[in-house]
Amino acid sequence: MASTERLLLSGNEAVALASLHAGVRLGTGYPGTPSTEILEAFSLIGGPAQWSPNEKVALEVALGVSFAGGRTLVTMKHVGVNVAADPLFTAAYIDLTGGLVLISADDPGMASSQNEQDNRHYARAAIVPMLEPADSQEAYDFTLAAFELSERWRVPVILRMTTRICHAKTEVIPGEPRPSTLEPHFQRDIPGRVMIPAYARPAHHKVRAKMEEIARWNENSGLNRIYPGDKSLGIIASGISVMHAREAAPDATLLALGVTWPLPMRMITDFVNSVDRCIVIEEGDHLLYEALTVAGLKVEGKPEMYRFSELNVTRVRRIIAGDVSPEAPRPRGKPPELCQGCSHREVFEALSRLDCIVSGDIGCYTLGVLPPFEAMDTCVCMGAAIGVGLGLRHVLPEAEARRVVSVIGDSTFVHSGLTGIAEMVYNPPPTGHVVLIVDNSTTAMTGRQEHPGTGRSLNHEPTNKMDFVAVCKAMGVKNVEVVDPQKDEAKFEEILKDMMARDELSVLIAERPCILAVPLIRKLEKAEAEKRCAAGGCAAAPVE
Amino acid sequence: MAVTNIVLAGLGGQGVVKASDLLSTTAFSSGLQVKKSEVHGMSQRGGSVTTDVRIGKQVLSPMVPMGEADFLMVFESTQVDLNLGWLRPGGVLITPDLIPEGELKNRKSLNVALLGAASMVMDFSEQEWVAAIHQCFPPKLHAVNEHAFALGRKLGAGLSRPEVIEGV
Ligand SMILES: Cc1ncc(C[n+]2csc(CCOP(=O)(O)OP(=O)(O)O)c2C)c(N)n1
Ligand code: SF4
């Protein structure tokens, strides 16, 4: 690739291209806005990529790749890191082999998320370095740097992006490919990789020492930049805030932090001492401000009101001016709604008619909470529908308990619903329980990704298909039924009503593909049938 | 630091994001810096969508500040009032009223028709726009979009450029 080539790429596409140039052996992840397009773009340009059932498994697969000496990329949205946190915290103790970069795509302002947690906390808590690009060029450059950093110190590295980095398209001039020199092979390292207490105790000391070294390296890493300007105002910023701040205060001197953990404290101290007034511009929590204040530096933070939602140029101007007057409300557009013809509609109409107490979950079907349905009573995190529904059933008076139904999507069921079924079978409530899986053969919410229940892999090639009916039965659920809620609307409602009346454990699968996914599904099925035909198995091809 | 700010607004399924891609591609190919930003992720149709495109020699933030858009293009009449706050004094408002019902063979190409209208008061040549159409759409959609673009240029002939206000 010529180094003068100019590309207009989203941050997600830039990470994908850099991962290809870094020679990533396997990209894993679970969909989640705003991270989803990274693996899709990586696959499109020829990178090996696969969706895992959830983020924890994705990170575990990536760890295996690293132990085998391969570079590996793991992508997820901010709340996905909560799911992957268990392997992450111990992975930090381990001497990795192949470079491992975890993308945390945060969503300040909650454009498409259930909370706006600030994942910069994870770097400090899990003891891992964190890089934060400010545009697509840096997303490209920092991804390559992150692989090298990871391999050099044998630590996982988090590349933290936010919606405006992931989805904004900006110029990228790519460089030459810089693959690893490692070749995959197995090398035994028991004390380095087996985290029993005897090996984990020294490992904790070791990772702390690594972070001190990385902090020293970061003083001159080249990833933190000073934009010179007037010394009367100094600004310290990272990520997208760098761009907002440079625009809001074009004359100020600005320190743009690229590696935000561990911090280059000497560089920061010199910067603070070089200006008359120094203000920290950071989106989300007051993390950097607090770290610098604890270190005894005289810096200003932002008023509490700016902790909430995204920053932008207007808000940064206000922070610099110390303006805490109420902000003009942003235009509130029309909320999204279930597509016309979406089979979730019939499901929520039935739940509403039967006056169900709906323990809900996350996906397109969460829109069942809005009018005209208003048929969802709880929604916490992926997979919570089942556990929360069981808790309600255990404690509510019988008449109310009977009305509780857990509603969960197919992708969500695979992500974190299976352990809920285990709980239900193990600790059944006296009134039994009803779990409704709304199976639309895709992960619709995030743009229609495949998952283990669709029988197709990330790039839509056929693979093994998980059988929900067989799984539920094998786990010990007594009644398992499959109905098309659109074609057999009356039957669907009748079965649901019947299941609610029993003191038994039931799973009802409402099966009908998402109408936006149908064209692709049909095309893939046809291609599959033709392939089987060509292979001489015509009789086995399905007749439509 | 002269940056041209364009906000495109409409409803999901109307091709708002596609139109912003077309505009960005045209501007980027002409050698300028472009930043394009929107919030997406919800698959479902019908909700409000806005995207910001910023064009200039140097562009910093990818988001257009409220009240600083030189152009506001709205693809659905119910969304006009809601979005007026983006437009700066003297900026240009382009609404679907510009393209009367029935003029387009397929109302789906309204997005490209409105860009055609806007192109009359922007600084890129017709060839640059057509090249971008070829880059952004599959071959079988070239003709219909070129037609919509040409219609937009005809109907947009009466538009005037954004007023230059002191200091801008
Ligand atoms: C831990 C975590 N990972 C990812 C997401 C993003 N996300 C929300 S719902 C969902 C899956 C939706 O698919 P499905 O359950 O099949 O429902 P559908 O949208 O198809 O109706 C995803 C990926 C999230 N909210 N939390
Ligand atoms: S994208 Fe699919 S699942 Fe989501 S609302 Fe539309 S039809 Fe329903």
Image (cartoon, coloured by chain):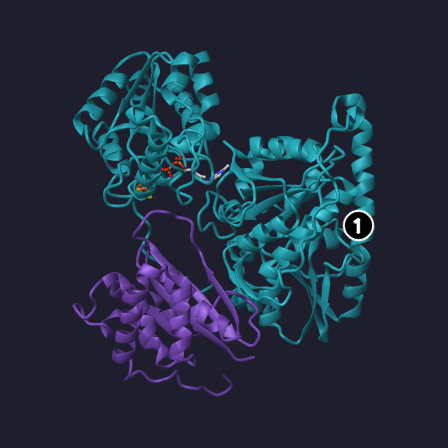
Location of residue A91 in the rendering, given as x and y in whole percent from the top left corner = 69, 33
Cβ(mark 1) to ligand 1 < 8 Å?
no
The x, y position of residue A128, in whole percent, is 71, 42
Residue A52 appears at what percent x and percent y? 52, 33
Q: What residue type is labelled 1?
A: Ala
Q: Quadrant of the N terminus of chain B?
A: bottom right
* Residue identified by numbered label 1: A215
Residue at image location 31% in from the left, 50% down from the top? B45
A347 horizontally vs A98: left or right: left
Q: Ligand 1: which quarter?
A: top left
Q: Chain B is drawn in which colour?
A: purple
Chain containing the residue with disc 1: A
| Residue A212 seen in the figure | yes
- Residue A139 located left or right of residue B29: right
Q: From this viewpoint, is residue A319 visible?
A: no
A191 to the left or right of A310: right
Residue drawn at x 65%, y 31% is A64
Q: In this view, does A186 lie above or below B5?
A: above
Q: Nearer the viewer, residue A310 or A322?
A: A310
In the rendered structure, the colour chosen for chain A is cyan
Q: Closest to the observer: A249 or B101?
A: B101
Image height check: is B168 above or below A115? Answer: below
